[in-house]
Image: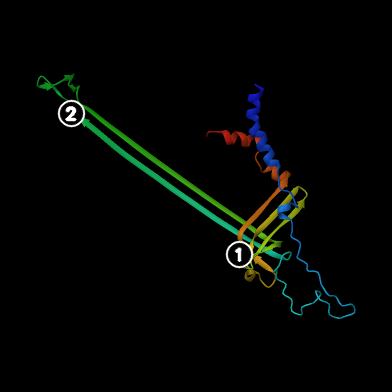
Amino acid sequence: MKRLATIVLLPSLLAACSNNLMVRPGERDWAPADPLVSQPSGATPGAIYQPGFGLSLYPDQRARQVGDVVTVNLVERTNASKQSTTSTERDSSLSMPGGTLLGGPLTLGGRDLLSSDVSAGQKFDGKGASTQSNSLTGSITVTVFQVLPNGNLRVRGEKWLTLNQGEEFIRVAGTIRPNDIGADNSVPSWKLGDARIAYSGKGSLADANSMGWLARFFQAVSPL
């Protein structure tokens, strides 16, 4: 009996644990990359110009190497709509004339006993509709963590907001072409290649909007 109870409750406990394994800020996979710093060599004491400490008169503020930051403007909007209608109908009938017995029909009370009529009808109507709309706007500054051989930049970053009722976070990762970065060192989110954008949160408000682990368990095993 104990073993049966353990088998029944084990999926529920696993579902509860998976719900509690919420993402946390500062995870290693989302940590910012340190910039590549080259050590100056051959410093000359007292000289005006020192190797490795030059200052460009016309600097370009756009991201180009590991450790640089770039602002991603979130302009995400999706609209999906689907509708389907199915209708089928079929009618069939079969009539068999009555046979004869000793040269005449077999009747009872004026009714032919050997004749028969069979008819069948089938009809099906089905309709379905689905509509979904999502929108996400804002901005987040991410860090370049890898420069690909073709010059494209792989970026990632996260932003956490601690509110009085919990925490909310935005995570963005993807690949950016340097030519798509604007003069203000920003790029729209729809120009990110292989983009991964996540927006969620945790706390009392998030818990109130999520289904409990026991309800999720019964919903998962329900045959309906």
Tag 2: Cα neighbours inside 10 Å, few (<14), some, or many (≥20)? Answer: few
Mark 1, residue position: 191
x and y percentages locating residue 104 in the rendered image: 11, 22
Q: CA distance from mark 1 to mark 2?
A: 76 Å
In the displayed structure image, the side of residue 24 where residue 99 appears, left or right:
left
x and y percentages locating residue 189 in the rendered image: 63, 62
Q: Mark 2 or mark 1, which is nearer the start of the sequence?
A: 2
Q: Nearer the viewer, residue 63 or 119?
A: 63
Q: What label sits on residue 109 in the rendered view?
A: none
Mark 2, residue position: 97
Amino acid type at image mark 2: Pro
For the point 68% across and 37% down, which residue is it?
16
Tag 1: Cα neighbours inside 10 Å, few (<14), some, or many (≥20)? Answer: some
- The mark total stands at 2
For the point 48% across and 51% down, which residue is it?
82
Depicted 48 relative to depicted 213: above or below: below
Q: Nearer the viewer, residue 210 or 220?
A: 220
Q: Splitting the image into 4 quarters, where does residue 147 fall?
A: bottom right
In the displayed structure image, the side of residue 92 where residue 209 appears, left or right:
right
- Numbered disc in front, either 1 or 2: 1
For the point 63% across and 35% down, which residue is it?
215
x and y percentages locating residue 220 in the rendered image: 58, 36
x and y percentages locating residue 155 in the rendered image: 68, 61
